[in-house]
Amino acid sequence: MPVAETLFRYHGADGVPLAGFVWRGKTRPRALLQLAHGAGEHAGRYRERLAPLTEAGFLIYAADHRGHGLTSGMSHFGDFGPGGAEACVSDMADLARLAKAENPGLPLTLMGHSMGAMFAQAFLPEHHALIDALVLSGTSGPGPRREGPANSAFPNPRTDYDWLSRDDAEVDKYIADPLSGISFTPTSQASFRSVAAKAMGNPDLSGVKPGLPVYVFVGDEDPINNRLAAVTPLIDNYRAAGMDVTFKVYPGGRHEMLNEINRDEVVADLAEWLTANAMGA
């Protein structure tokens, strides 16, 4: 599917330069999708996979977090900088405002994967008014976490990243990608853990508009959600706060459902939900 890609640059509230992409299909945009990618990867990994959404009418804004991808400047991988992970959440709010200002009247969905999903959870209490729907992929939650490295959940792994997907080719692509597989500095790792702990603690969700559409999709073999034990309480909390939550679980799926062996099914399900719940006129 042909996707028109535009590189854009903007600045965080503290003046730090940030970079990302806008992806547009041939159809007239009827809604906005803002992507927050995971740790140790970059927004560009999603261009091909989310192409069907652009043809469905979504204009996609996908920025690289601090310490990642183009925003890192190729020399500061894994380092959020002085603002820490909190600044990444603030950057997401700035990007949401930018996308809405450039496309007045179009509804905005925030989609976060893994670390980006944790940032989205941290984003919600303060910035919920900026979005019309929320999508979380490969997320964890306030339930019990699995101890030990993620890959140790699988016996006799072929690589250090088997936990990402059952598709060997996709795992190999990740390993070969020079913008993926980065490690955090100790300070940045501590900062991320702090933001995640707050997001998974007891955030005040009382201001979130009742009925906010939320789509959470995960694999039940994902060690990050401890095979659903960590994420199920998040679903309960969001429903208790009045959000309209759809919880999709893929049997056998690992951490990156968009890169799993059934990825076409996953993308089709995502497109169907977005079209039904997050599309403008």
Image (spheres, grey):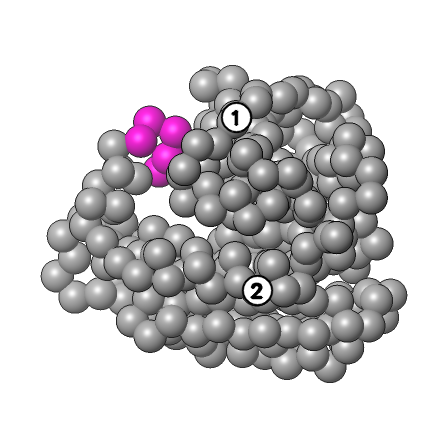
Q: Give percent across and percent down for residue 81.
A: 61, 29
C-alpha distance separating marks 1 and 2? 24 Å
The main secondary structure of the magenta stretch is loop
Q: Give percent across and percent down for residue 141.
A: 56, 68
* Circle 1/circle 2 CB separation < 8 Å: no
Magenta residues, start to end: 177-182
Q: Residue, x 22% and y 65% (percent of image)?
A: 154
Q: Which residue is tagged 1? A: 5
Side of 46 relative to 275 (left or right): left
- Would residue 199 be visible to someone looking at this image? no
Helix, strand or loop at label 1? It is strand
The quadrant of the picture occupied by the N terminus is top left
In front here: 125 or 266? 266
**Disc number at residue 20?**
none
Where is residue 237, by image quadrant? bottom right
Local crowd size for mark 2, using a 10 Å CA cut-off: few (<14), some (14–19), many (≥20)? some
Q: Residue, x 37% and y 35% (percent of image)?
A: 180
Q: Give percent across and percent down for residue 208.
A: 82, 65
